[in-house]
Amino acid sequence: MSQETEERIAHLERMVDDLSDTVATQDKEILRLTRLVELLAKAEAARQSEGSGGAVFADERPPHY
């Protein structure tokens, strides 16, 4: 194998390792964010089931108008 080929292989191996690290980091972040969304969804469901008694009108203008 030539010197140039060995260098290219080494470079490609480094790129694969870097990409693998990036994917592993992103996987951990996706799992963390998924858990957070689940917790927020449960909290919102609990809040809605309690019933705040107030009505929310989407087309109502805020008081500062």
Image (tube, helix red, strand yellow):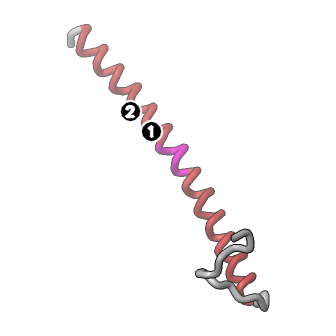
**Label of residue 16 in the image:** 2
What is the x, y in percent for residue 33? 60, 58
The image quadrant of residue 17 is top left
Task: Tell me where residue 2 appears, x and y as whole percent.
Answer: 21, 9
Instruction: Give the Cα separation between the discs numbered 2 and 1.
Output: 6 Å
Residue at (68, 82) in percent of width and height: 45
* Rendered residue at 57%/50% (across/down): 28
Where's residue 47, x and y in %? Answer: 75, 82
Q: How crowded is mark 1: few (under 14 residues within 10 Å), some or many (20 or more)?
A: few
Relative horizontal placement of residue 63, taking residue 34 as reference (left or right)? right
**In the drawing, does residue 65 fall left or right of residue 19?**
right
> How many neighbours does mark 2 have within 10 angstroms: few (below 14), some (14-19), or many (20 or more)?
few
Above/below status of 64 relative to 42: above
User: Over which residues does the magenta segment extend?
Assistant: 23-27
Q: Which amino acid does label 2 sit on?
A: Val
Residue 40 falls in which quadrant of the image?
bottom right
Q: What element carries label 1?
A: helix
Q: Which of 3 and 56 is in front in this view?
A: 56
Residue 50 visible in the current orientation: no
Q: Which residue lies furthest to the left in this view?
A: 1
**Secondary element at image label 2:** helix
Q: Quadrant of the N terminus?
A: top left
Residue at 64 percent across and 74 percent down: it is 41
Q: How many marks?
A: 2
Residue type at tag 1: Ser
Q: In which quarter of the image is residue 8?
A: top left
The image shows residue 2, relative to residue 14, as above or below, that is above
Q: Mark 1 points at which residue?
A: 20
Please report the residue visible at 64 percent of the width from the left and 84 percent of the height from the top. 57
Is label 2 in contact with label 1 (beta carbons under 8 Å)?
A: yes
For the residue pair 30 and 11, the one nearer the viewer reads as: 30
- Per the rendering, the mark at residue 38 is none
